[in-house]
C-alpha cells in the first residue's frame, strides 16, 4: 500500500508536485493550491491510499521538490 499525505493549507502553489506527479496532483483554479486527486481530507491532511506502487517514484520526486515540505510518501 502507498500512502500519500498533503498538508494543503500550507501549500504555496509552486506547482512542482504537479510537474513531477501530474496523475496524483493538480492545481486548484479556485485558490491556486495543489489538490491530491481522490484523497480524503481529515483535519487539513489530505490522504490518498493506493495499492498501485507504480506511483511511488513520481510522488517521491514531488515530495523532494516541495519547498515547504508538505508532502509525505510512505510504502507499507
Image: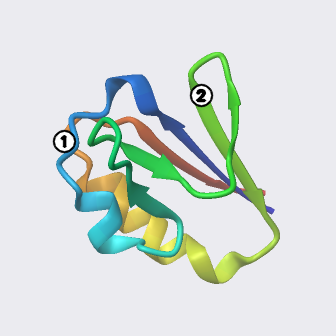
Report the quarter where the C terminus lies: bottom right
Residue 23 is left or right of residue 15, and the answer is right
- For the residue carrying disc 2, how many other residues have a C-alpha within 10 Å: few (<14), some (14-19), or many (20+)? some
**Residue furthest out toward the top:** 43
Q: Is residue 9 left or right of residue 4?
A: left
| Residue at 26% in and 48% down | 66
The x, y position of residue 60, in whole percent, is: 44, 63
Q: Secondary structure at mark 2?
A: strand
At a point 69% along the width and 77% down the height, the residue shown is 53
Badge 1, how many Cα within 10 Å: few under 14, some, many 20+?
few
Label tally: 2
Locate residue 18, reporting x and y percent.
33, 65
Element type where label 1 sits in the image: loop
Q: Which mark is residue 31?
A: none
Label 1 vs label 2, nearer the camera: 2
Determine the residue positioned at 26% across, 42% down: 32
Task: Compute the Cα span from label 1 to label 2.
Answer: 17 Å
Mark 2 highlights which residue?
Answer: 45
In this view, 35 is above or below 2: above
Q: Quadrant of residue 16?
A: bottom left
Q: Position of residue 21 (x, y in %)?
A: 42, 71
Give the residue at x 31% y 33%.
11
| Quarter of the image that includes the N terminus | bottom right
Mark 1 lies on residue: 67
Specify which label sits upstream in the sequence, 1 or 2.
2
Above or below — where is 17 with respect to 43? Answer: below
- Residue situated in front as seen by the camera: 32 or 51: 32
Residue lying at the far front of the rendered structure:
30
**Residue placed most toward the observer, 56 or 21:** 21
Q: How is the image coloured?
A: rainbow
Q: Are marks 1 and 2 in contact (CB under 8 Å)?
A: no
Amino acid at each position: 500500500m502507498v500512502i500519500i499525505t498533503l498538508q494543503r493549507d500550507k501549500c504555496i502553489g509552486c506547482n512542482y508536485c504537479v510537474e513531477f506527479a501530474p496523475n496524483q496532483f493538480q492545481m486548484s483554479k479556485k485558490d491556486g493550491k495543489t489538490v491530491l486527486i481522490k484523497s480524503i481530507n481529515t483535519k487539513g491532511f489530505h490522504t490518498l491510499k493506493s495499492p498501485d506502487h507504480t506511483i511511488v517514484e513520481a510522488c517521491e520526486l514531488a515530495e523532494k521538490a516541495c519547498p515547504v515540505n508538505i508532502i509525505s510518501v510512505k510504502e507499507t
